[in-house]
Image: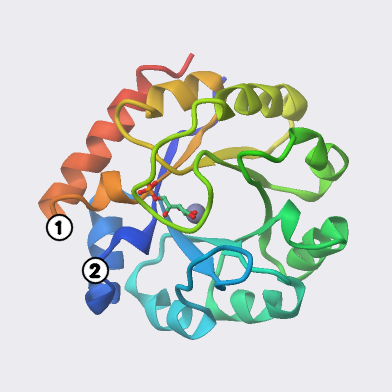
Amino acid sequence: MPRQLRIAPSILSSDFSRLGEEVTAVANAGGDWIHLDVMDGHFVPNITFGPPIIKTIRNASDKVFDCHLMIAPADPYLSDFADAGSDIITVHAEAGLHLDRSLQAIRGLGKKAGVAINPATPVDIIQNVLDRVDLILLMTVNPGFGGQAFIPAVLDKIRAVKAMVGDRDIDIEVDGGVTTETAPLVVAAGANILVAGSAVFKGGTPDAYKKNIDAIRSAALAAQS
Ligand code: DX5
Ligand code: ZN
């Protein structure tokens, strides 16, 4: 039985001048989770937002807040992101020396724990933390920006992680360059959580968001075995 397919719009591609409205709109348009791309200008070459902004938009939707921390170090800030309303907190395996401790800390805060790996990072890095995670995020672009081209080489990594996970209760999330064209590829490889920014927010209206989400979902469902 395949795991439930979910579409997680990344608000990085939304209109930041109306962030609360955009979160409500994309949630009402069918987004299953809200993907929050936190960037510190150190781990990635871009800066976005932190806990105060997440706290501000928390009441814009009751959908799962899927918080992707592209920050290093992450440990000092985990409780702030938890207090701000994150439901899932994902740290990069590359962002610190003590990944097992970071993941335990996230669960200790009562949140679901995720681990993310960049395109060039071998999947072996997560082999020893499978019992510490609820989600594995595979970057299909180099982190920092929306609207980049999908990296097809990551498809083999998705297949490898799917095999590693087996029947464990772990979601496999793909993030970057997800469109109606690439969605079926990543789902066929084993992903069930699809993050999409530019492919969802293109068109700039709630009607467009719904059309875009529906198109990505139907393309993905067609590939679910
Ligand atoms: C990139 C972020 C992604 C990005 C996805 O560092 O982690 O979530 O916003 O944007 P698209 O879907 O436009 O590639
Ligand atoms: Zn992301």
Nearest the eye: 145 or 183: 145
> Residue at left 60%, top 80%?
83
- Mark 1 residue type: Gly
Nearest the eye: 175 or 108: 175
Nearest the eye: 167 or 190: 190
The picture places residue 153, in percent across and down from the top left corner, at 56, 26
The circle drawn on residue 15 is 2
Q: For the residue carrying disc 1, how many other residues have a C-alpha within 10 Å: few (<14), some (14-19), or many (20+)?
A: some
The circle drawn on residue 148 is none
The picture places residue 23, in percent across and down from the top left corner, at 31, 66
Q: Quadrant of residue 75?
A: bottom right
* Above or below for 72 versus 207: below
Q: Earlier in the sequence, mark 2 or mark 1?
A: 2
The picture places residue 184, in percent across and down from the top left corner, at 40, 22
Q: Quadrant of residue 173?
A: top right
* Left or right of 178 in this view: 161: right
> Residue at left 74%, top 34%?
123
Q: Are marks 2 and 1 in contact (CB under 8 Å)?
A: yes
> Residue at left 24%, top 78%?
17
Q: Secondary structure at mark 2?
A: loop
* Above or below for 14 versus 216: below
Q: CA distance from mark 2 to mark 1?
A: 8 Å
- Mark 2 residue type: Asp
Q: Which residue is mark 1?
A: 204
> Residue at left 71%, top 40%?
121
The picture places residue 201, in percent across and down from the top left corner, at 24, 53
Classify the position of the N terminus by image quarter.
Answer: top right
Q: For the residue carrying disc 2, how many other residues have a C-alpha within 10 Å: few (<14), some (14-19), or many (20+)?
A: some
* Left or right of 66 in this view: 128: right
Q: Secondary structure at mark 1?
A: loop
